[in-house]
């Protein structure tokens, strides 16, 4: 597996682990005066997930598969 | 869902909310009909939009299909009872896992679909494992899992209209003379028919292409609804800082997760969003993509879109725990699903906003409903009729009309089922649909990534997974729900049932595959093209 792909999957695993924010479990403090910190963390997590997938699209895009799919179909075409 | 509370503020005679909904439905139908101008008149266009959908519409149709009315009404209701942990439990897991499914599974399946002309999951699995038996076994499992989900959508959207027009306190509903038996409410036989009819018109005419157009519009509507709603509710509560300060004083426990959910439960929800990997309606949307590049926007923007819809609704659910009525008494809810509508009706007090909210809820529900009708029509046409007749018997026009015929048939059957009193709560069944599809995810993942997976492994795993799913479902409905009336999730050893179902699927798949002969080299070569 290329290094870039490996990095993406390491980051994915890290995100998977970081989802479990036990450190904010009982924390009722607020961010910006109105957003519960546990919710702010997970809203930030959603943004971080988007960043992760942006990196995946940029650095781990399945170019080979795309090229293979775009080649002339070997079958009779669509079944319907 | 009972939305009669929406009329607590405006007088029952004020038909504005109903006109807003009628306007929305007419606009939706008009858009669906307009989209048929781009319809190419072929069965391929009807089933997969000639594989021509670009990034923006793919994003909107996929997002609209994966989000249901739960994203608006259920999220605020669950937050009200369980606190802000609901966002991490469902929304942020979904943001990470859904996009992973699109990236890892969706693009691959699109590539195979384009290369070999697949229109349904059964066609792909049959070829991938050289097993017509697998296709025949998979079909009923997928259909049985999708039907309750479909019913939930139709019943919930019909109930939204019936509830809105129903009586509130001493006041009669909208049409007390016409519908005396329901105290003025539009009866469910009519409201279900209206929703089913609107969806039927555009799905029948333009197939998946019209579905994509309609979903794009509906997604914009329900996303805007969430943003408009939180803005107005926050303003009515004196601003977001003041609203949350009240919660901190009166009900601070909702601002955290301590005592509201266990760590294991929180973790095991990760298995639920895997269901998107096996949803037949999502599979069909993936196949509509013009190119692999069309997926890029969906993969990246999906978590952000989830955040845009969920954060406002979760905040309204939090604020509801400390909200007060105009006379200063605490706001109470007879059931949690009233949280969003009651907060809007009491605090915003505008029939226009009431109408927009219900339209937004309908948009969220119907954007899944149309795709499910469409995918079942595609499956019945291609996995049953075409397969049974060898595929050569019908002209392309006949296939197109077969597809349309099945759309009518499926809508009619769903409508009839929605009016029957079933022996089980269909909403409970709906929740189990996600567990079923999530539990089956290892099958599609192995099909795409594991060369050593065998047909016997997959067949055994499918049967074992379906059996365990059915056993747990029966236990939940007949034993657990009778002894746990608080609506709490059934947990097994502290984890969600989907985690158990998923584990059974993985174990049987791996063990039986390793114990049986590997697939033919030609099949492996066909589905694992060499990198160049």
Image (cartoon, coloured by chain):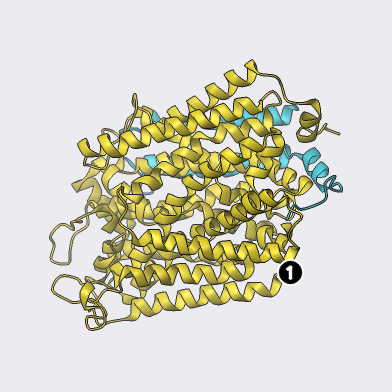
Chain colours: A cyan, B yellow
Camera sees residue B266? no
Q: Position of residue B65 (x, y in %)?
A: 53, 55
Total marks shown come to 1
Classed neighbour count for the residue bearing mark 1: other residues with Cα under 10 Å, few (<14), some (14–19), many (≥20): some
User: x%, y% of residue B85?
Assistant: 36, 40
Quadrant of the image for the C terminus of chain B? top right
Q: Is residue B412 above or below residue B77?
A: below
- Please provide percent x and percent y for residue B294: 70, 53
Residue B435 shows in the view:
yes
Q: Quadrant of the N terminus of chain B?
A: bottom left
A51 displayed left or right of B495: right
Between residues B311 and B281, which one lies in front from this camera angle?
Answer: B281
Q: Which residue is mark 1?
A: B40
Front-most of residues B61 and B201? B201
Tell me which corner region of the image, top left, top right, bottom left or bottom right, holds residue B128: top right
* Residue at the image point whose x is 31% and y is 81% from the top: B15
Q: Identify the image quadrant of residue B312.
A: bottom left
The image quarter in which residue B458 lies:
top right
Q: Does B345 appear above or below B427?
A: below
Chain letter for the residue marked with disc 1 in the picture: B
Q: Is residue B165 left or right of residue B198?
A: left
Q: Secondary structure at mark 1?
A: loop
Q: Position of residue B447 (x, y in %)?
A: 66, 33
Residue farthest to the top?
Answer: B515
Q: Is residue B67 above or below residue B112?
A: below
């Amino acid at each position: 597996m290329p290094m870039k792909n490996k990095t993406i999957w390491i980051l994915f695993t890290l995100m998977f682990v970081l989802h479990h924010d036990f450190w904010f479990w009982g924390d009722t403090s607020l961010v910006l005066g109105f957003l519960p910190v546990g919710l702010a963390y997970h809203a930030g997590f959603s943004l971080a997930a988007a960043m992760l997938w942006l990196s995946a699209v940029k650095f781990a895009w399945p170019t080979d598969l795309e090229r293979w799919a775009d080649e002339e179909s070997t079958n009779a075409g669509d079944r319907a | 869902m009972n939305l009669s509370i929406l009329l607590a503020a405006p007088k029952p005679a004020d038909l504005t909310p109903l006109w807003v909904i009628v306007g929305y439905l007419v606009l939706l139908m008009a858009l669906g009909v307009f989209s048929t101008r781009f319809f190419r008149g072929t069965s391929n266009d009807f089933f997969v939009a000639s594989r021509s959908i670009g990034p923006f519409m793919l994003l909107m149709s996929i997002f609209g299909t994966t989000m249901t009315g739960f994203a608006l009404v259920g999220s605020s209701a669950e937050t009200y009872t369980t606190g802000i942990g609901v966002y991490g439990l469902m929304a942020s897991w979904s943001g990470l896992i859904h996009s992973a499914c699109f990236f890892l599974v969706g693009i691959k399946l699109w590539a195979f679909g384009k290369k070999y002309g697949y229109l349904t999951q059964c066609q792909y699995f049959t070829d991938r494992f050289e097993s017509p038996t697998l296709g025949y076994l998979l079909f009923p499992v997928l259909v049985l899992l999708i039907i309750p989900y479909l019913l939930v959508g139709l019943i919930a959207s019909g109930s939204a209209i019936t509830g809105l027009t129903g009586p509130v306190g001493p006041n009669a509903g909208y049409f007390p003379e016409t519908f005396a038996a329901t105290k003025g409410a539009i009866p469910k036989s009519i409201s279900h028919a209206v929703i089913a009819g609107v969806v039927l018109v555009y799905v029948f005419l333009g197939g998946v292409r019209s579905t994509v157009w309609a979903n794009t519009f509906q997604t914009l509507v329900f996303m805007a609804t969430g943003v408009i709603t939180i803005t107005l509710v926050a303003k009515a509560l004196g601003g977001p800082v003041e609203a949350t300060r009240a919660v901190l004083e009166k009900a601070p426990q909702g601002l955290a997760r301590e005592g509201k959910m266990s760590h294991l439960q929180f973790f095991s929800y990760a298995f639920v969003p895997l269901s998107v990997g096996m949803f037949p309606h999502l599979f069909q949307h993936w196949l509509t993509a013009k190119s692999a590049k069309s997926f890029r926007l969906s993969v990246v923007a999906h978590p952000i879109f989830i955040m845009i819809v969920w954060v406002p609704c979760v905040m309204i659910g939090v604020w509801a725990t400390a909200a007060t009525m105009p006379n200063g008494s605490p706001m109470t809810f007879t059931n949690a699903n009233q949280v969003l509508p009651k907060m809007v009706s009491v605090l915003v007090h505008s029939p226009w906003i009431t109408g927009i909210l219900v339209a937004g809820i309908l948009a969220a529900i119907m954007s899944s409903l149309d795709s499910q009708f469409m995918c079942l029509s595609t499956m019945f046409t291609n996995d049953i009729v075409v397969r049974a007749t060898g595929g050569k018997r019908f002209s392309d026009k006949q296939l197109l009309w077969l597809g349309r015929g099945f759309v009518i048939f499926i809508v009619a059957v769903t409508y009839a089922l929605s009016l029957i009193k079933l022996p089980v709560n269909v909403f409970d069944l709906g929740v189990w649909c996600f567990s079923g599809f999530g539990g089956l995810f290892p099958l599609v993942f192995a099909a795409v990534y594991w060369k050593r997976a065998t047909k016997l492994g997959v067949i055994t795993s499918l049967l074992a997974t379906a059996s365990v799913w059915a056993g747990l479902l029966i236990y939940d409905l007949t034993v657990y729900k009778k002894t746990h009336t608080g609506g709490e999730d059934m947990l097994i050893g502290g984890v969600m049932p989907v985690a158990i179902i998923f584990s059974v699927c993985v174990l049987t798949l791996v063990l039986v595959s390793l114990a049986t002969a590997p697939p033919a080299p030609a099949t492996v070569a066909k589905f694992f093209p060499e990198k160049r």
